[in-house]
Amino acid sequence: MQRTRFGEMACSIARTLDVIGEPWSPLILRDVWAGVRRFDHIQADLGISRKVLTERLNHLVEQGVLERLPYDARPRYEYHLTVKGADLVEMLMVMARWGDRWLAGEAGPPVLYRHHACGRIGHVDPRCSHCGEPMHADDVDLLPGPGSA
Amino acid sequence: MQRTRFGEMACSIARTLDVIGEPWSPLILRDVWAGVRRFDHIQADLGISRKVLTERLNHLVEQGVLERLPYDARPRYEYHLTVKGADLVEMLMVMARWGDRWLAGEAGPPVLYRHHACGRIGHVDPRCSHCGEPMHADDVDLLPGPGSA
DNA sequence: CACCCTGGGTTCCTTAAGGGAACTCAACTT
DNA sequence: AAGTTGAGTTCCCTTAAGGAACCCAGGGTG
C-alpha cells in the first residue's frame, strides 16, 4: 500500500514514527542493542524477509540511528547503534515494560533487566526531569511549544 | 501486503508492537490522550482514511487499550483510554522526548509537557524502579526471564 | 410529515508494501 | 577450479493503505 509520511506533522511522536515506525524497525533495533548485529543473524533471528530487512537497515542508517561498519577485509558489515540510536533504547525498554506488565501472562517476562548501578532486576520508571517524581499519563498538561507552527 | 504477526514471539517488545505497532496507532492514542476522542475529529486531525481509522480503533478496543463509550442518546461514541491504555502514554512521552531532542530542529519542540507535581516544563527521564538512578541503553544487562521458553 | 444534517461508519477500486524464494557477487578456503 | 559465506538483489504474489463515494440511524426544521 502507499503509506502516509508522518514526518511533516508538527508532532514529535509522528516524526519519531517516521524514523522507527515502520514494521520490524523496533525489533531490528532491539537485536542490534542485544548484540545481533549482522545481516544474516538479524534475518534469521526475526524471520524477516531479506528484502525488507535491507530496506529497514538502509533507512535506519540514513536516519543516523545505526551505522554500518566493516568487520573484515572481505565486504562484511555489522550494524551498530549510534548515540542517536542508543537514545532510542529507553523507548524499547518502556515498550518492553508495558508488554511485561500487560501481555506476559502466567509465564512471566521473557527478558529481565539488571541495572548496573544497583545490580538488581528492575524496569524503567518514567520520572520528571526536574523534580524526579513519577511522570505518567495524568501527571502532565500539554502546552503548545515554540515549534507548534 | 500480508504482515507477520509479532505476538507469538517471546519478546515483550514484539507483543507490544502487535497491539500498537500498526501505522497510525500511536498517533490515535496521542489524540485520545490529548482529548481528541471522536471518530470525525481524529480522522480530520490526522488525515487518516476512515477505513483504516475504523480498523485501528476496533483493534485498540479489542486489545483493551481504548474503550468506546456513548455520549448521546443518538448512536454517538467517544473513545477513551483504559487503564491499560493510559499506561502506554509513558511510551508516547518517551517517543516525543526523542523526537524533541533529535528531530525538532531550530523551531524547537511542538509540544511542552508541564508536570503537575512541580509545575515545571520537563520531559520524561527513565529511571531504575529500584534505585532511582538513570536507566539508559548502557545501564542494563539483559538476562533470560521466566517466560523465555 | 418530508426533508436535511450529523456522526460514525462501510464499500470499492487503485496503488504500493511485505513475504518469500531464487539469484548474484566479491572475497576467501580447499 | 570449485565450493562457501555473508550480504545483499530480483521477481512474483498477496494484502494492506489511500481515498472517494455511499449508507444509515436519529434528530432538527419548515
Image: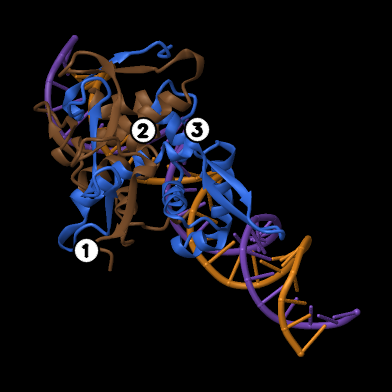
Chain colours: A brown, B blue, C purple, D orange
Determine which quarter of the picture holds residue B87. top left
Marks 2 and 1: in contact by CB < 8 Å? no
Q: Nearer the viewer, residue A45 or B35?
A: B35
Above/below status of A17 relative to A144: above
Q: Position of residue B4 (x, y in %)?
A: 48, 34
Answer with mark 1 or mark 2, whichever residue precedes in sequence. 2
Q: Amino acid at mark 1?
A: Pro
In the image, are marks 3 and 1 on the same chain?
Answer: no
Q: Amino acid at mark 3?
A: Arg
Label 1 element class: loop
Residue at the image position 14 percent from the left and 38 percent from the top: A83
Residue at mark 3: B5
Label 3 element class: loop
Residue at mark 2: A95
Q: Is residue A50 left or right of residue B100?
A: right
How far is the residue under mark 1 from the one under mark 2?
28 Å
Residue at mark 1: A146
How far is the residue under mark 2 from the one under mark 3?
17 Å
Mark 2 chain: A
Q: Position of residue A16 (x, y in %)?
A: 30, 49
